[in-house]
Amino acid sequence: MAGSILLSSCDVINQLASQFSSVANLANCEFALKNVSNVSVAGVNVKNLTQGNLSATDIVKLVAAYQSKQVPLALDVNVDITNPTKTQAAMTALDWILAIDGTDIANGVNSRSYTIKPSTTTMVPLPVSTDLGQLFSKKGLDALKNFASSFTSDGTSSKVGLRVKPSLSVGTTQVPFPNYITLEKKTGTTKNTGKTSTLSKKKS
């Protein structure tokens, strides 16, 4: 009986040690803004705007949205988390803030738990739904067109910025990291400030 209790205690200790190691290793991971996908403005696919394939219906939707000062934006922001070590890492949540042209326009949290295996990259999708009406009402319709046309074929845009704050579990308590990590991917280049940003770098 005593032997069984001792083995059970050892198992619990080993599990806790493994969990702590995975959580602690999150600090060694690199966060990068991979791309933005499934972008629509006022219900119009942004590809139609960038490729000049607007239908009469698309034009009516855009003009009506702009005049009503309600311009719904929907998109998926995809974040890559790379674990360069030989130990798995664990994340229990990811808070995010999305900015366009330097202005924060949406925020949220992905509450799903992720395990990032050694020497691998895991993509975390962040569905975003917000309204651009206030942002573009003063800048004019051209500003809205410029935003839509800023997206390149690889899903990047110089006008989109993202800040993320990962969380981890310590026992039964979820603990967020103290600062946000700024991720920006420039259009037409491979430069990505998030690619070299670990949790100890590029914070705001």
Image (cartoon, rainbow, N blue to C red):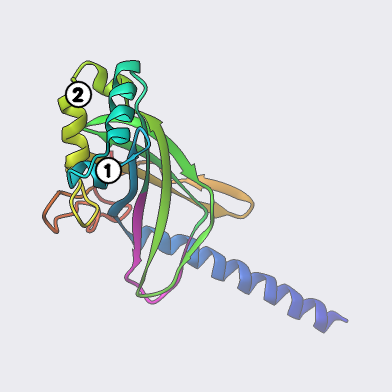
Judged by its main secondary structure, the magenta piece is: strand
The residue to which callout 2 is attached is 141
Residue 86 is covered by the magenta coloring = yes
Q: Is residue 112 above or below residue 134?
A: below
Q: Is residue 109 left or right of residue 46?
A: right
Q: What residue type is labelled 1?
A: Val
Percent across and percent down for residue 198 are 29, 56
At 35% from the left and 75% from the top, the residue drawn is 119
Q: Is residue 101 above or below residue 122?
A: above
The residue to which callout 1 is attached is 46
At 18% from the left and 44% from the top, the residue drawn is 50
The local secondary structure at tag 1 comes to helix
Q: Distance between the residues labelled 2 and 1?
A: 15 Å
Percent across and percent down for residue 184 are 22, 46
* Quadrant hosting residue 107: top left
The local secondary structure at tag 2 comes to helix
Percent across and percent down for residue 116 are 44, 67
Residue 38 in view here: yes
Question: Mark 1 and mark 2 in contact (Cβ < 8 Å)?
Answer: no
At 20% from the left and 35% from the top, the residue drawn is 147
Count residues near mark 2 (Cα–Cα under 10 Å), then give few for <14, some for 14-19, many for 20+: some
Residue 49 is covered by the magenta coloring = no
Quadrant the N terminus occupies: bottom right
Q: Which amino acid does label 2 sit on?
A: Leu
Q: How many labels does the image show?
A: 2
Residue that sits furthest to the right in the current view:
1
At 42% from the left and 36% from the top, the residue drawn is 129
Quadrant the C terminus occupies: top left
Residue 203 in view here: no
Count residues near mark 1 (Cα–Cα under 10 Å), then give few for <14, some for 14-19, many for 20+: many
Q: Is residue 184 above or below residue 101?
A: below
Please provide the residue range marked out in magenta: 77-90
